[in-house]
């Protein structure tokens, strides 16, 4: 449909008029879109939680390796000092 409107300067502006969906249809489509967005946000939060848990597990494993490495370093230093002191 073509419609006309008057601007503030009293000139005629023509534009194409497209009827919008009824409120119920638009509301249902909006609700569906909101549900999709909420589901996506939930998925993103779950992925973030999984990543954080993965990071924590990796940090824990790194600390275990670090502690084990430090223990071996102390043991070898003690061994070397004992060899030097006692001449073994």
Image: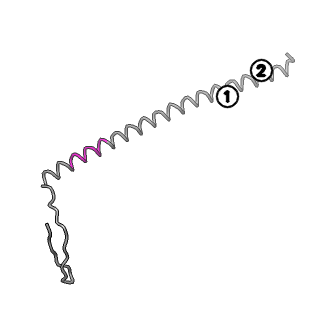
**Residue at 16% across, 59% down:** 20
The image position of residue 64, as x and y in percent, is 58, 27
Q: In this image, 77 relative to 4: left or right?
A: right
Among the 4 quarters of the image, the one containing residue 71: top right
Identify the residue under disc 1: 70
Residues drawn in magenta: 30-39
The residue located at (29%, 46%) in the rendering is 37
Where residue 44 sits, quadrant-wise, is top left
Image quadrant occupied by the C terminus: top right
Measure the C-alpha gap from mark 2 to mark 1: 14 Å
Q: Quadrant of the N terminus?
A: bottom left
- Label 1: which secondary element: helix
Q: Name the residue under label 2.
A: 79
Q: Position of residue 32 (x, y in %)?
A: 22, 45
- Towards the viewer: 79 or 52: 52
Question: Which residue is drawn at the image coordinates 25% and 44% (left, top)?
Answer: 35
Circle 2 packing at 10 Å, graded few (<14), some (14-19), many (20+), is: few
Q: Residue at x 67, y 28 (%)?
A: 70
Disc 2 element: helix
């Amino acid at each position: 449909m073509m419609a006309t409107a008057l601007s503030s300067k009293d000139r005629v502006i023509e534009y194409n008029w497209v009827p919008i969906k009824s409120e119920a249809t638009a509301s249902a489509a909006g609700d569906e879109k909101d549900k999709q967005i909420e589901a996506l946000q939930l998925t993103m939060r779950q992925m973030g939680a999984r990543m954080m848990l993965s990071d924590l597990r990796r940090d824990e494993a790194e600390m275990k390796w670090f502690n084990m490495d430090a223990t071996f370093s102390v043991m070898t230093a003690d061994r070397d000092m004992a060899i030097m002191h006692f001449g073994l």
